[in-house]
Amino acid sequence: MIYLLGSIPLGIAPLTGPVGHTFDYANTFAQHQPTRGKPVLQEIGSELDRRTFDFFFSEEFCDPASELAKLEAAFALKTPLPLVLGNGVFNGTRYVIESLSGSITHTDRAGSPVRVEATIGLLEDPIAGGLFSLITSIAKARAPARSSSASRNPEVRK
């Protein structure tokens, strides 16, 4: 099984990685202060998903110099790339490389990298996820809030 970001391998599981994978999901809520009692929460929506991978390129399964060049190009171009995890499932979400850091830990006699360790931070790109997800998010944002006082007060227009 391979972890892929676009065509860039993030390791071949379980032998070579990735050695670390963290994720961060968040929701946003507004708090409205009533005259009495506790604040009331209103759901604003979901924040963009973030993922971080620690991995390495090794000559055992790829050409580290060319894979590092692909990774640097994807970072520079800010291109949304599909992320396919080790189970082979792609859920339609694409990510841009928000941060990239790495080190060349081994080289051959000519100075070419033999092993490169890297950490990338990925940020979800919801527009690249497809037109349907974009339309759904716009519809949710424009949908009127349900108000229980509107149903009880005849002076309020529906």
Image (tube, helix red, strand yellow):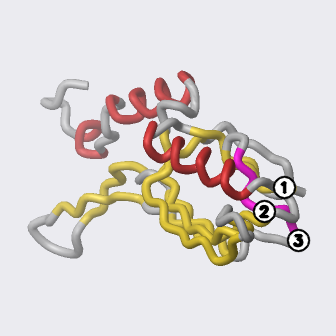
For the point 19% across and 38% down, which residue is it?
153
Q: Is residue 124 left or right of residue 29?
A: right
Given contact means CB atoms under 8 Å apart, are the residues at marks 2 and 1 in contact? yes
Position of residue 46 relative to residue 14, above or below, is above
Magenta span includes 91: no
Question: How packed is label 1: few (under 14 Cα within 10 Å), some, or many (20 or more)?
Answer: some
Q: Is residue 69 left or right of residue 84?
A: left
Position of residue 13 relative to residue 83, above or below, is below
Question: How packed is label 2: few (under 14 Cα within 10 Å), some, or many (20 or more)?
Answer: many
**Mark positioned earlier in the residue sequence (2 or 1):** 1
**Label 1 belongs to which residue?**
2
For the point 72% across and 63% down, which residue is it?
57
Comparing 99 with 156, the one in front is: 99
Disc 2 versus disc 3: distance between alpha carbons?
8 Å
Secondary structure, magenta segment, majority class: strand
**Label 3 belongs to which residue?**
14
Q: Secondary structure at mark 1?
A: strand
Position of residue 114 relative to residue 127, above or below, is below
For the point 56% across and 68% down, which residue is it?
119
At which x and y percent is residue 47? 41, 53
Position of residue 41 relative to residue 19, above or below, is above
Q: Quadrant of the N terminus?
A: bottom right
At which x and y percent is residue 9? 75, 53
Q: Secondary structure at mark 3?
A: loop
**Label 2 belongs to which residue?**
11
Q: Which residues are magenta?
A: 8-14
Q: Secondary structure at mark 2?
A: strand
Q: Is residue 66 left or right of residue 140?
A: right
Q: Quadrant of residue 31?
A: bottom left
Tell me which amino acid carries mark 1: Ile
Tell me which amino acid carries mark 2: Gly
Tell me which amino acid carries mark 3: Pro
